[in-house]
Amino acid sequence: MKRTIYISLLFILVLGISIYLYFNQRVVAIEQVFPGKIWAKPIENLPNLKGVGAPTAKKCGGCHTEIYDEWKLSTHANALSDIQFQSELAKPSSPKWICLNCHIPVQNQRETIITGLKNGDYFRPVEIPNPNFNSEMQSEGVTCATCHVRVDSDSKESYVIGGTGGTTPPHPIKIDRKQLLNRCYDCHNEAYTLNESLICSFQTGTELIATKSNEYCSSCHQPEVRRSFVKPSLNKPIRTAHKHGFIGGGVPKSFDLYKDQIRLGYKPGIVLSDLKVENNRIEVLLRNSNASHHVTTGDPERFYRLILVGIDPLGKTIYKEETTIGQEWSWSPVAKKVSDNRIPSGKSFLWKIELPNLPIETLQFQTIHVRLKNNTSDYMIQSSGYVSAPYKERVEKMKELYPHSSLVIESKYQLKTKSRKDTPLEELFERNVHRKGE
């Protein structure tokens, strides 16, 4: 009797362990864990393009020289090397393979292929070597192929997606303007909760669609320009093309990129509609006139800092007020949005301040677009031990190398004459090169 009981208990134990091991080690397809999520997998490996070779940005730049030169200055080109991203990626809590699906989105850029997830756990990806890994292409971040190259389902050959047509390129091409225009939403429009402290919240596309305008992301971030699509030596006609600097909020990834921001199309989303003083009350009116989405948008930790200072006749600052426009999130123990006073497209933000009884001669108003807070970069520097070379050294020098914010609006108001003078944007960006920190 005892023997039978022991055998039964042993059988149950073995069965329990087997079931546990099965469910704990079974490989679940990524599509099952993230159904319908384009960002859950990179673009499939792209074979060499006929007439071009490897589908790298450098190869594209052999003919599309101006476009390539603009792209090299873009946020997209710096998507992998971005210091802040590398610091975030190195955190033990980071599901690295998911993050990389947007920052190096083509399978050729990945050393391994994720074939599934153990027990459906996104922290336990099953990886195999990628025979088509291209290290040069990896360094290109969001490269040309991200939007412009795909594999034909029948021929299994790579082709270029064009938006205009009427050309005779050396490579296969298919015209699909709509696909190009909608491609941005795959990474720039998501709200997904991985766990209680890991949330993706990038709703720029939803904000744009809600305006019911005819604008696309490219309308502002890729301004039209008249030029040939390719280098002059190929003698192709001048046409309506788009700049490829992908200018965003005016805070570039390195200080040496400031000089190109305005040339590539940057202008603030908000404008200073009015600054007036009546009966010892100051009213500052900001309007989202230039962005078809909220400002700020994208990264939930971005915000505008508004600063108003009072200056006496001797040029000394004797008064100061500050407020912010943006989202406020609590990240621990559970990530949640606490507040949101961002400005939707076409709407305004009114800041009212009671003016104190001080000998103020001039009021100076500034708007600073903050991408990275000082206390956040301080933490990243302290945690740089998680970051591997070559990025570790750059994270340690983040304050010196990485723009945290940009001054995008400045205006001075003379109380006696009630006159206002705005600082030209070009001058502000010359000064931004020398600004450090938040």
Image: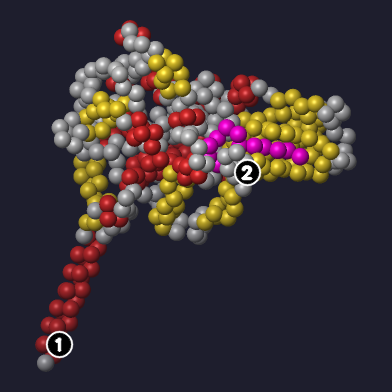
Q: Nearer the viewer, residue 415 or 235?
A: 235
Region rendered in magenta: 283-299
- Circle 1 SS class: helix
Task: Look at label 2 and name its amino acid.
Answer: Ile
Q: Is residue 115 above or below residue 56?
A: below
- Residue under the image location 15 percent in, 87 percent down: 5
Q: Is residue 93 above or below residue 150?
A: below
Q: Position of residue 254 (x, y in %)?
A: 50, 28
Numbered circle sitting on residue 5: 1
Q: Can you tell which of label 2 and label 1 is closer to the viewer?
A: 2
Residue 437 can be seen in this image: no
Residue 25 location, quadrant: bottom left
Residue 196 location, quadrant: bottom left
Which quadrant, please, contains the C terminus?
top right
Q: Nearer the viewer, residue 80 or 283?
A: 283
Q: Residues within 10 Å of mark 2 (few under 14, many from 20)?
A: some
Is 290 covered by the magenta stretch? yes
Task: Look at label 1 and name its amino acid.
Answer: Ile
Residue 22 can be seen in this image: yes
